[in-house]
Image (cartoon, rainbow, N blue to C red):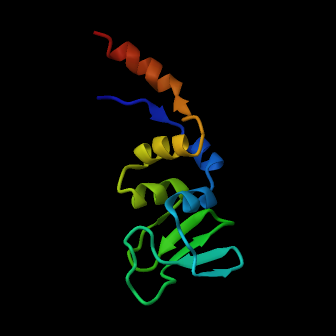
Amino acid sequence: MLMPGVDFEVLRREITMQQVLNEIGFKPTHRNGDQLYGRCPIHGTTSANRRVFSENFSKGRYYCHQCKSYGNPLELDAAVHDTTVYQAAIALGSELGHDVPWIKRWSTHCQYLYQP
């Protein structure tokens, strides 16, 4: 089944890392300027080192030094919920009160191609 496209660029501008961290319940254990550190919300750090996960607000990127996961806010939400970025964008947009920015030219084109 062909699904309509999502304009990820729009969502990346609208949804901040702070919103995603709040939504997933991330609790930092340390802060240094724009950098937050803590347990990894993706693989559930059990290590005594509670600073394996880092997030940089000025860059809007995260990185886990243990599981090597990295990316932007949408990719973090997808990794935490073990889903695709497409599914995460739709769910996260809804949870945060953002309209999903559908790419209309694709859906119009698809309707033309797949009419019975």
Q: Where is residue 14 in the image (x, y as percent from the top left)?
A: 64, 46
Q: What residue lies at 69% left-to-right and 73% top-to-bottom?
A: 34
Front residue of this view, candidates 14 and 92 = 92
Q: What residue lies at 43% left-to-right and 43% top-to-bottom?
A: 86
Residue with the most extreme bottom position:
48
Image vertical order of residue 1 relative to residue 16, above or below:
above
Residue with the most extreme right position:
33
Q: Position of residue 22 (x, y in %)?
A: 58, 61
Image vertical order of residue 107 relative to residue 9, above or below:
above
Q: What residue lies at 65% left-to-right and 80% top-to-bottom?
A: 31
Q: How many marks?
A: 0
Q: Where is residue 57 in the image (x, y as percent from the top left)?
A: 66, 66
Residue 9, located in which quarter of the rendered image?
A: top right
Q: Position of residue 11 (x, y in %)?
A: 58, 44
Q: Quadrant of the C terminus?
A: top left
Q: Quadrant of the N terminus?
A: top left
